[in-house]
Amino acid sequence: MERTLVERVRSFNRTVTERVGALHDHFLGRAHALGEARLLWEIGGVGAEIREVRGRLALDSAYVSRLLRSLQRQGLVVVEASREDRRVRRVRLTAAGLAERAELDQRADAFAQALLEPLSVRQQVRLAAAMAEVERLLLASLVRIAVSDPTSADARWCLEQYAAELNERFDAGWDPARSISAQPHELTPPAGILLVAHMREAPVGCGAVKFHAHAPAELKRMWVAPQVRGLGLGQRLLAALEHAAREAGVSVLRLETNRALTEAIALYRRAGYEEVAAFNAEPYAHHWFEKRL
Amino acid sequence: MERTLVERVRSFNRTVTERVGALHDHFLGRAHALGEARLLWEIGGVGAEIREVRGRLALDSAYVSRLLRSLQRQGLVVVEASREDRRVRRVRLTAAGLAERAELDQRADAFAQALLEPLSVRQQVRLAAAMAEVERLLLASLVRIAVSDPTSADARWCLEQYAAELNERFDAGWDPARSISAQPHELTPPAGILLVAHMREAPVGCGAVKFHAHAPAELKRMWVAPQVRGLGLGQRLLAALEHAAREAGVSVLRLETNRALTEAIALYRRAGYEEVAAFNAEPYAHHWFEKRL
DNA sequence: CGCATTCTCTGACTATAGTCAGACAATGCG
DNA sequence: CGCATTGTCTGACTATAGTCAGAGAATGCG
């Protein structure tokens, strides 16, 4: 219990300060400069390539190089050329470096603990719950949805994840060849549209619409990455797709889905989709829905 | 609605970052260095004494002096000697300074807005509610309770506030001379004990116990400042007083209270106090409570 | 009146957190 | 092989955010 409350607070601090723009791990400093402490942290227990660490922290190469030299002088890290590519250098923590990192970790724990300590247990629980809610919603507000080319790397990745998930969740697996098609050209304007959601550069969801000249448009390829479920992204994607469809002159949207996809079905119902009789022969479908825009 | 959501987010940011230790108003910067922006902000619309601003921001006198010189060169502030004491200098914003401050204000609003914008209205409302809860509890965790000398300035201030509030809330006012006494010597160990709660140096509540050799100890002078009500401070004070009483060997605590003090009565009941027959002749009391520790 | 104190300011200094240009070595590719 | 590219490093520089010592003016107090 105690443990998870502390974790909550720390996790919350990370998120909030990222959103708020500060690096504030100020309390981690004092032993090392903040820059060194952040680097020490980011290197991690198993070591990492310098370029990778630099990318994650978005720091200048010269600056990182100097920070590493300083950490090296203090005996906290070793830097060595990578096996595969001798231009690339890897950095890892020495025993002293690991100890230092554990110390930072402990100070952050103590900080979180000091924050909780004056509160009653009930208050601590409520604080943790509210922090979780704030964190969740701040993360949700980091997600951006944009029209995407279905052949782009991120779009393909999402569509692959979608396929893999259907294949796992459907009783009989999922073979796209047997299912109604949603080829790249069908999801590219003016034939259709594909939206991809990103969180901090990483693709985390998608959804598409296929337009038809004399029939309702079809909703396709709705997928939300597991790590962002519960953030309301499905609803946002759906709303964005409906908006795009309306812009394209669509008046009725419809879709079919498999009984295994219970969250999706609940999402469609919540969004005002009504179950209708089968309007196609999709072999994997158990439910057909329709909504007038 | 929109307005209060933005305010919520901003208010939350202020609190969180203070707790987390960062000055992060980083997004306020870019036009001026962060230091200058903070100063501009702290001076406020009506001007202030330099020493006051310096105290609030906890900055070095030399540093503030230089920052002010810089703001002065930019035509944003004027510094002039105070009327009453010509050693003291006052600073106030010029028209340009006020405009600059409004600009910062607007940027902070835009920042908060950008954070809310991707969310659905329901999510925005939930975010604001969770932020408020977090803020409330973080504030609560800033409050520290300590044993205090009843003659100290902070203790006297709390006791005066207590008296003023009773005088206002009781139907017939409150005259301490007619009420059971709680003189400084009665609230000083070993005769009794006074706890004062502080939030960021400022006194925000108090509570006392009078010990009696052959009778139950008496709870006295429970008061919580209006601006920190709803933070559970009453419960914490009560718990701390009970703890102190138990340490002093007290086995039964009792108290009397006026029917106007409904929150206090609810607090005592929640904390396990049971209403008993009048055990003294306090003229202002309507209810008598007792708890076995 | 004179001495201590208060408030502000200047000068001199430091650490942190960078940025930018370019050198150098390893690698990839035609 | 030669040339472009990639990854890292060094040198030179900058802005920010301070700190510390001490000077000087105004004030308070005995």
Image (cartoon, coloured by chain):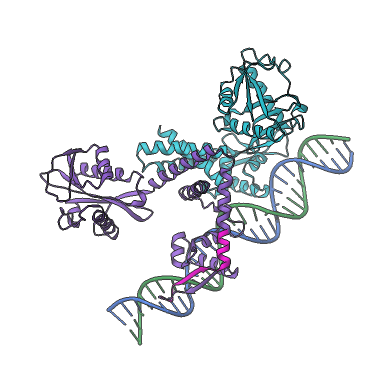
Chain colours: A purple, B cyan, C blue, D green
Residue A208 percent location from the top left of the image: 23, 50
Residue A243 percent location from the top left of the image: 25, 42
When asked about the image quadrant of residue B215, the answer is top right
Q: Is residue A249 visible?
A: no
Residue B266 percent location from the top left of the image: 55, 24
The mark total stands at 0
Residue A190 percent location from the top left of the image: 17, 51
The span picked out in magenta is A85-102
Instruction: Please tell me whether residue B192 is drawn above or below residue B166 in the rendered image.
Output: below
Where does the C terminus of chain A fall, quadrant-wise? top left
Front one among A129 and B45:
A129
Instruction: Please tell me whether residue B256 is drawn above or below residue B196 in the rendered image.
Output: above
Instruction: Please tell me whether residue B45 is drawn above or below residue A78 in the rendered image.
Output: above
Q: Taking A263 as reference, is B229 left or right?
A: right
Front one among A248 and A224:
A224
Instruction: Please tell me whether residue B193 is drawn above or below residue B74 in the rendered image.
Output: above
Residue under the image location 44 percent in, 60 percent down: A56
